[in-house]
Image (cartoon, rainbow, N blue to C red):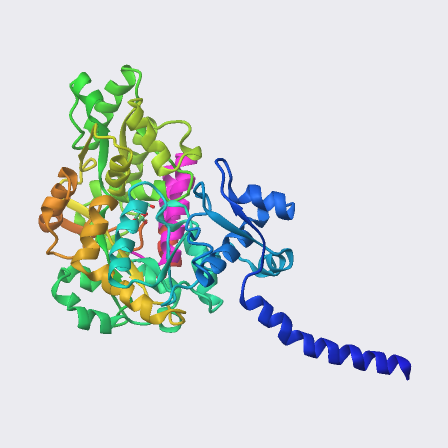
Amino acid sequence: MKKMLNLLILAVLVLTLIPVAASAQEGVVCQEEVTVAADDWLSKYADKYFGNVLSWPAIMALHNQAAADDPASFPNSIVNADILEVGWTICIPAEDAAEAFLATYDPDKPETLYAAGESGQLVVGSWWTAGGEAEGLAGMFRIYEEQYPGVEIVNATVAGGAGTNFKAVNKTRLLGGDPADTFQLHAGLEVETYSPETYLQPVDDIYASEGLEQVFPPDLLTLLKYQDHYWGVPVNIHRSNVLWYNEALFGELGLTPPANFEEFQQVAEALQAAGIQPYVMGTKDGWEAGHVFEDVLAGTLTPEEYRGLWTGEFSWMDPKVTQALENFKMMLSYVNEDHPALTWDGAGEYLIGGTGGMMIMGDWTDGWFTSKEFTGYGWAPPPGTQGIFVALSDSFSLPAEAPNLENAENWLRVCGSLEGQEAFNPQKGSICARTDCDPALFNEYLQSAMVDWSQDAIVPSVAHGAAAIESWATDYKDVLTLFVASGDVAAGQAGLQQACVDAGVCQ
Ligand code: GAL
């Protein structure tokens, strides 16, 4: 009986205490307020107060909440976990609150590290972390902040070129019903992988209200439409097929960029004889070989034949595809040995350092060179692709369950706007998706890309979502990664054919 009574008392106590505990959580309790000194950083505090360097997210999140609740005491919120400024006052949260935060913390949802602004958050998912692209994105954020003050923008990036890592994280979030408010999506068939009818919302209304059908070129609009709807607002046009070279080296050796594969070999031999790594690649993220090979295909086939590969009208078993693999194999005989350890920008360092001659990569390289203050680069269409523009476009989409819907819709308005595109593209190393941007804002390379975009034969990139559904693009890239290692032309061609069969496009 006594035991029963004790239990009852305990139950009453627990029930009355719960609301007290909940209300205590509404305001952040700081166990200490510290003033940032030189060489202080978040994980140092985490170690000192919680005995674990990995507890830093709890300090960041709860400090930011305290800063939102009480800006007079904490005027500075932490935007970047690596940047604390000397003199800031940081709220070190109470241990139990830190533990409670960490129990549910998911690093793939960086929004939990930030307080909501007066008008909520805007969580923007992308893979733009490299030089140039990060600055371009920041430029678009600035326009958004000017137009929609009071919204806390969360830059939810996952590093890895071409979205290698981002896409998996993003998919998990979408399927889990817990998406970012908007995310980077290539124009074209890539959208299929997200089952847009279930997980995304069409953005047709934004096209109508912003008059976007009048400002994007018709071919791009066609590429963007899937199942009769628009699922993303494009911010740019990128070119996949650019051969970048070190101008000073070419000048010293009296070389001109190779127009075809024979010339490529001659130039490579000359560079090699001069002790220069002739051709550089980084293949660390598994998409780069597929990227270069799409440009080799475009340089070996006609534009119609190249397009036909993705529609089933041109056979992957054609001798011209064999020839393309042979051409690529020849190029690979001049490649840097450390390519599997390097990302695309890591490989670019060879050009900057003057130890590498040529690299084939998309024109985000122009934004990256610029961010590195490297001006000694030249550009040309890779062998055989004069008059051909292998195109892709980045857009932003609207998840069906976007938590901050209005903020996301306004973001898409900025993405489609002239101000947004002019702030973004000159730094990103891409040209506007809109046709009315001011060319004077762009450097010489980008101005040349604008001219080419207006007159070249346009073919879609497969490595960046335009030409094929994601599963096919992945199989294709895997075949090329294997090919780089084996150099086996017959196996490579059979693999490419099989990938087409598996995609349901070839017999
Ligand atoms: C592409 C993307 C570009 C650039 C590049 C390197 O897929 O469209 O904007 O980010 O990857 O990561």
Identify whether 406 is placed above or below 467. Answer: below
Q: Is residue 356 above or below residue 326?
A: above
> Which residue is outermost to the bottom?
1
Q: Residue at x 29, y 55 (%)?
A: 141
Indicate the position of residue 299 as horizontal and vertical percent values.
Answer: 21, 40
Residue 373 quadrant: top left
Position of 1 compared to 94: left or right? right
Residue interval drawn in magenta: 467-496
Decide which of 273, 211 is in the foreground and name it: 211
- The residue that appears at 55% across and 58% down in the rendered structure is 105
Query: How many badges with numbers are in the image?
Result: 0
Residue in the image at 32% along x and 46% along y: 134
Q: Residue 154's quadrant in the figure?
A: bottom left
Toward the viewer: 289 or 329? Answer: 289
Query: Could you say where residue 307 lies in the image, as x and y percent from the top left?
Result: 22, 53
- Is 470 contained in the magenta span? yes
Locate residue 129 relative to residue 376 in the image: left or right. Answer: right
Please say whether residue 237 is one of the residues in the magenta stretch.
no
Does residue 20 appear in this view? Answer: yes
Q: In this view, does 129 lie to the left or right of 50?
A: left
